[in-house]
């Protein structure tokens, strides 16, 4: 057998062997005991075989994924707002499944045309398919962070008006969360829910800053926690923070405006100016060439 044939066999046999060994090595008695404990109170009766299969696949995904990488994915999902259509368990299942499908397509292409470029293309596409969900979640989290950063000054102004009108800080936060739209309002509502279930103020506020991972929101939460610890009036803290957030938003807008000429320079040089020169100078060049050709 040639080296390419051995490589194709390895790409098929090794992943299948790992998956079979993972299924065989599952502690089914321990898993059954855990399910029995979780099902007390009648919750397991409402679940069908689909839920059991999903848990098994999720456990398999957790076993096959490194713990550090799983924690990083969980942090990305938290930054993206934990979308309901893509929980961590489903993500751990979807990533290797997508990569496996692309790998099978690459193997079919290799069987038809066993060349080096096709092999490199198959490997690159398989790796890209495995990391595409990470890129999508990271992009969604970045957009969510920008939205929170943009909404924060206006939300602080609303909370400041409510506090100065005589409402408490949590009540002002509840009003801002109920009347507002977007990810920041969702985070405020989530923080209030944490407070209602008995979580301390400091832990709830710090958890909100950790979930959003926005520097401006983290600075605001740190100021609120310190004011709560030292007994400082929250109205003055809100006023100062709202003013600082507006200044930072204006500075970011000015920074983007100053970067704009540099970003436009390269498209202008390589895309717009050549077309402009061709349209303006093209007829003149054609006329000059025709005149010299007649003279010759």
Image (cartoon, grey):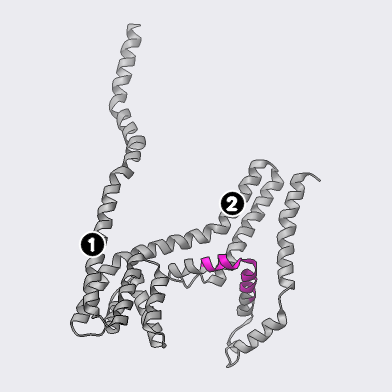
Along the line of sight, the residue nearer the viewer: 105 or 76: 76
Residue at 19 percent across and 85 percent down: it is 166
Q: State the residue position of label 2.
A: 125
- Earlier in the chain: of badge 2 and badge 1, it is 2
Pair 2/1: label in front: 1
Res. 257 in view:
yes
Is 288 situated above or below 67? Answer: above
Which residues lie in the magenta part? 56-73
| Mark 2: few/some/many CA within 10 Å (<14, 14-19, 20+) | some
| Mark 1: few/some/many CA within 10 Å (<14, 14-19, 20+) | few
Q: Residue furthest toward the left?
A: 165
Which image quarter is the C terminus in?
top left
Q: Position of residue 184 (x, y in %)?
A: 34, 71
Residue at 18 percent across and 83 percent down: it is 165
Q: Gap between marks 2 and 1, in whole Å?
A: 45 Å
Judge whether residue 127 is colored magenta. Answer: no
């Amino acid at each position: 057998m040639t080296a390419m044939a051995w490589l194709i066999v390895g790409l098929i046999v090794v992943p299948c062997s790992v998956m079979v060994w993972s299924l065989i090595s599952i502690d089914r008695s321990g898993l059954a005991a855990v399910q029995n404990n979780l099902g007390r109170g009648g919750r397991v009766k409402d679940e069908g075989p689909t839920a059991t299969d999903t848990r098994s696949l999720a456990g398999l995904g957790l076993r096959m994924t490194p713990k550090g990488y799983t924690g990083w994915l969980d942090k990305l999902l938290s930054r993206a707002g934990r979308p309901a259509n893509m929980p961590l368990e489903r993500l751990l299942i979807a990533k290797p499944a997508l990569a496996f499908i692309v790998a099978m397509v690459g193997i079919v292409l290799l069987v038809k045309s066993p060349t080096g470029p096709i092999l490199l293309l198959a490997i690159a596409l398989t790796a890209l398919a495995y990391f595409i969900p990470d890129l999508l979640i990271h992009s969604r989290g970045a957009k969510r962070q920008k939205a929170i950063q943009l909404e924060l000054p206006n939300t602080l102004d609303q909370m400041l008006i409510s506090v100065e009108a005589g409402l408490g800080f949590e009540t002002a936060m509840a009003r801002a969360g109920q009347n507002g739209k977007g990810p920041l309002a969702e985070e405020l509502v989530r923080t209030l829910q944490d407070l209602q279930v008995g979580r301390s103020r400091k832990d709830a506020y710090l958890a909100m800053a950790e979930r959003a991972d926005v520097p401006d929101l983290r600075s605001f939460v740190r100021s609120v926690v310190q004011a709560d610890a030292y007994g400082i009036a929250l109205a003055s803290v809100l006023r100062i923070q709202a003013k600082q957030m507006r200044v930072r938003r204006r500075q970011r807008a000015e920074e983007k405006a100053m970067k704009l000429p540099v970003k436009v320079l390269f498209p202008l040089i390589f895309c717009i100016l050549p077309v402009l020169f061709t349209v303006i100078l093209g007829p003149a060049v054609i006329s000059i060439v025709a005149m010299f050709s007649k003279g010759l």
